[in-house]
Amino acid sequence: MPCLKENQQPGKSKQSKVLPISMDAGFFFERAVSSLDRYHYDKALKYFRKAVEYEPDNPVNHCNMAGILSEMGNYEASNAALSVILEKIDPTMTECYFYMANNYANMDMFEEAEKALITYLEEDPSGQFLIEAEEMMELLQYELERPTKVTKIKSLAGVLEHDRARELLEQGRFTEAVKLLESIVEGQPDFWAARNNLALGYYYMGQCSKAIDTIYGVLEQEPGNLHALCNLAILYQHEGKTEFLQELSARLRKIIPFHQDHLFKLATTMGVLGAHDMAYRHFRRLLKDEALRTDPALYHYTAVAACNIERFAEAENLWRHVGRLDPGNEVSEYYLNRIEEMAAGTRPVPVHYHYHLPFEEQVKQWELPGEGIPTNIADNPLVRSSFFWALRYGDDGTKLQVIQAFGLIGDHEVEEALKAFLLEPEEDLYLKDLALYVLRSLGVDYELPVCTGEATLMIDPSQTWAKLPVWKSEWQAVLDLAYEQMRSNTDIQQQHDMESLWVQYLNLSYPDIPAISHIEGWAAALDYLTAKVNHRSVSYEKVAERYGISSSTVRKYSLRINEVCDAKDTVKMIFPYVQ
């Protein structure tokens, strides 16, 4: 059918018009594609080159030409065409680096292929060839016999960092995790998973208001975000916001998740909220998944839920299965030995779902003085989280225990927590002094800000002599000997009290401090008086035997220290116990 001019009516002209062929880049592109379909690579290359001639600034034409050169095995020419794009036309066309990596690999130039591939991963924002790049990375690792050094993947911006932050949370390294998550969220405000985990990090560290604000930020943008709703419910429970919790809990009860991770999140949340019937139903659904039937923790969670709805026979069977799946773990045996008492009502059922022994049982493993906290406890994020909570919300006695436990754990995470504790204006000064002592024992030898009420002072934990203008070697020798003798049978608090007592004695006696010539006598006296302050059973004879001196010597030096220190009522607890 002949082409018609615009507005021309049929039958008005008997002479047809033939439109001329438009010889442009599009024309040659179509010819090239047609040749490719018939596997005529030479013709296709010829047409792609003509397209480049007509539109030399169009990077797509150059890329097509590079593609056909690669198909024909002319990898070097293909890379030259790709280099023209990156260097002269469009440096943002980062997929060219992936094509170049393929060409180099086909030429067995694996070092160059690796460089091009790394550049692609680090510069390309879309990740169009991410899966293929991972496959090529495996090939290059095999050929080069070493791992490929990729520092970042731009198309996964925040994803790798988020995975690392999740690992830190699971390891109980909350401070590090929070710092990393804060940086991710700052760069990607709509990264909801990172925001939810940031809220958890704040929660684990006891910063509930920041956690709630973070969750509100997620729900403003995604009102149905299940992870955020579950986290918010737990925070409402902790904060005692009963009215809000009831409304949210009723909403969560109506949700039946499809995805496995959502189902698990909801199950654990309902357990924490005490809705054990719903927790049981959700955990039972999870157990129907073949992939999860080898997970002992899941059977334990289901057993706990069953206990709480008085399905004790079922709970017993579930814990027996836990024992078969994880025979080296003590959890199943612990609960199986107590399930009859639970059923009879003489022992309370477990109120938490964590797959470890109850906290009070774990504490028994490290209560002995001089014993460190077992690694499986110290590295448990749930245990570590409970420490952070106790340091922020516990009573003074609990906080004292936590500070001592931190001294036994002794990693960067607890250092940061203790430094933050020093800045809390309402905390007891004795506890802050103990925290400084622990920080010194962990190697902190620089000044730290300490809030002492209305003022904030810079205090160096390593300066044990406090107000003394000098510190003599014999004074330190007394401390060293006492510490050496006390280390095996006292805890960190008692060692701190011994040191504080000695420094106090020297401060009050200065400048008329007597000559310290009998190191053993003074050290034994500190040992004895510290035991009395801390209500430990002790006698002069017992202490004298450990230091190789007479009991009368211990008594003499004990009275001298006590006489001076009592003048300022600094250790007023000592007097009632002096024998």
Image: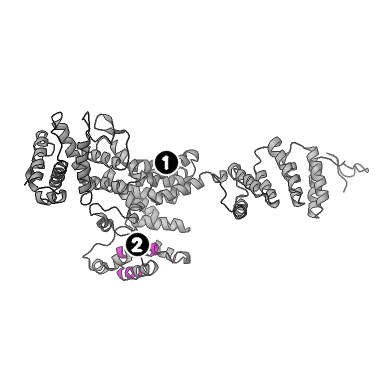
Determine the image quadrant of residue 323. Answer: bottom left
Q: What amino acid is at disc 1?
A: Lys
Q: Are marks 2 and 1 in contact (CB under 8 Å)?
A: no
What element does badge 2 sit on? Answer: helix
Disc number for residue 277: 2
**Residue 429, image quadrant:** top left
Q: CA distance from mark 2 to mark 1?
A: 37 Å
Kindly identify which residue carries mark 1.
Answer: 179
Residue 296, magenta (yes or no)? yes
**For this view, does 447 lie left or right of residue 295?**
left
**Circle 2 Cα neighbour tier, 10 Å, few/some/many (<14 / 14–19 / ≥20):** some
The dominant secondary structure in magenta is helix
Q: Residue at x 47, y 49 (%)?
A: 163
> In front here: 208 or 1?
208
Residue 113, given in percent of the width and then of the height, sits at 65, 48
User: Mark 2 is on which residue type?
Assistant: Asp
* Disc with the residue nearer the chain's start (2 vs 1): 1
The spot of residue 455 in percent (x, y) is 26, 29
* Disc marking residue 104: none
- Residue 294 lies within the magenta run: yes
Q: Note whether residue 222 is visible.
A: no
Q: How many dots with numbers? A: 2
